[in-house]
């Protein structure tokens, strides 16, 4: 972990993701959490939250400039994208064929349809050695 007292080590200036499915214009939200690489899981202490707004019901790529940037004084972090509710759904596209390292995690909290899923690594979800969400970010050192 890189730490410079009194200064952020990184700034997250943009987030983009590919939508697999959206219904009912779900409102998307970004949470940035610390990530524990030893346990391959996020630490459930939100560092920053950004409302990304309503997502139209289509499957196009979306990009969001983060102004002001999210300032991070840690190297290992997790991005949580949430969206949907009783009348809307947001699902991000996944890649389970690419060979990039790292973890992609999914959890589903379904209000009423009994499809709740606890936090699960996408590798287990797809029974694949590699699996990730199709998202990208712009990070700058400060």
Image: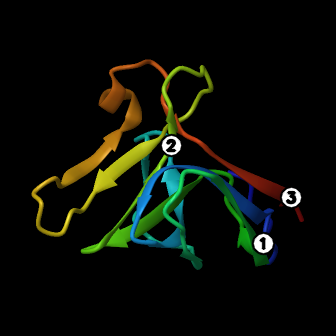
Determine which residue is flagged by label 1.
5
Residue 56 picture quarter: bottom right
Q: Report the Cα–Cα distance between label 3 and label 2.
A: 25 Å
Residue 110 visible in the current orientation: yes
Numbered tag placed on residue 30 in the rendering: none
Q: Secondary structure at mark 1?
A: loop
| Mark closer to the observer (1, 3) | 3
Determine which residue is flagged by label 2.
93
Q: Position of residue 85 (x, y in %)?
A: 30, 73
Q: Earlier in the sequence, mark 2 or mark 1?
A: 1
Q: Nearer the viewer, residue 83 or 58?
A: 58
Numbered tag placed on residue 140 in the rendering: 3
Q: Earlier in the sequence, mark 3 or mark 2?
A: 2
Q: Secondary structure at mark 3?
A: strand
| Mark closer to the observer (2, 1) | 2
Q: Position of residue 125 (x, y in %)?
A: 31, 32
Q: Secondary structure at mark 2?
A: loop
Q: Earlier in the sequence, mark 1 or mark 3?
A: 1
Q: Residues within 10 Å of mark 3 (few under 14, many from 20)?
A: few
Q: Report the Cα–Cα distance between label 2 and label 1.
A: 37 Å
Say above or below: 134 vs 113: above
| Mark closer to the observer (3, 2) | 2
Quadrant in the picture for the C terminus: bottom right
* Residue at 48% in and 26% down: 96
């Amino acid at each position: 972990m890189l730490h410079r007292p009194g200064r952020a080590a990184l700034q997250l200036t943009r987030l983009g993701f590919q939508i697999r499915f959206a219904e009912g214009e779900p409102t998307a939200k970004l949470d940035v959490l610390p990530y524990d690489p030893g346990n391959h899981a996020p630490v459930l202490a939100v560092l920053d939250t950004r409302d990304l707004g309503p997502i139209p019901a289509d499957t196009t790529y979306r990009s969001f400039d983060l102004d002001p940037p999210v300032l991070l004084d840690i190297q290992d972090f997790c991005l949580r994208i949430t969206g949907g509710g009783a009348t809307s759904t947001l699902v991000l596209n996944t890649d389970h064929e690419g060979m990039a390292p790292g973890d992609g995690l999914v959890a589903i909290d379904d209000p009423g349809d009994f499809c709740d899923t606890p936090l699960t690594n996408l590798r287990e979800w797809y029974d694949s050695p590699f699996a990730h969400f199709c998202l990208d970010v712009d990070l700058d050192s400060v």
